[in-house]
Image (cartoon, grey):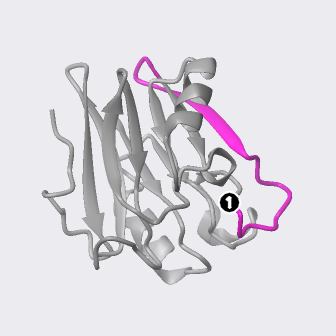
Amino acid sequence: MRKILIVSDSHGLTEELTRIKNRHRDEVEYMIHCGDSELEKSSSEMEDFLAVKGNCDYDSLYDNELICAFENEKVFATHGHLFQVNMTLMNIKYRAEELGATIVCFGHSHIAGAEYIDNILFVNPGSIFLPKMRKEKTYAIIEKVNNNLSVRYYDLEGKELPTLSLVQ
């Protein structure tokens, strides 16, 4: 499996999170929640997710950052509030460079988007609760094919949103 599911800013939603998880469980290597789930880490909805602590999460069992390996890539996930991602990606980029990360997953701004900056892929899946800059509630799947990373965005019903996707 050469895919990672990325979700963020679900702010207490349970049914939607479970539906997304069940829809993609068998096709992804990892499922990452980039914070503000507002759920206990031990909840059934968060089971199977690697998750970080957002500014609206109060369960102390969440870490602020996580690192995992994926297809010869190093993935760095964090919520983003500690790096002021609402204003700039510079701080989170510096942290990614310190860690040697080639993929950065973050949330906080509720704005879906994927871009490369200095050969590092930055992915914000948007929000499945209250998106900004668009009406669709979104999540993302990163896929590696032939050493190329692609990011595809989906709405809550699992319909791909090609205008948001970054495909190489």
Residue with the most extreme front position: 87
Magenta-colored stretch includes residue 55: yes
Measured as percent of width and height from the top left, residue 121 is found at 37, 32
Please state, as top left, top right, bottom left or bottom right, where the N terminus lies in the image: top left
Q: Residues within 10 Å of mark 1 (few under 14, many from 20)?
A: many
What residue do we see at 47% from left, 78% from top?
129
In the image, 68 versus 25, the foreground residue is 68
Magenta-colored stretch includes residue 66: yes
What residue do we see at 50% from left, 45% from top?
88
Residues drawn in magenta: 54-73
In the image, 120 versus 10, the foreground residue is 120
Left or right of 63 on screen, residue 144: left
Query: Which quadrant of the view contains residue 114?
Result: top left
Seen in the picture, residue 156 relative to 88 is either above or below; the reply is below
Measured as percent of width and height from the top left, residue 46 is found at 63, 64
Measured as percent of width and height from the top left, residue 34 is found at 56, 54
Measured as percent of width and height from the top left, residue 163 is found at 14, 58
The residue tagged 1 is 54
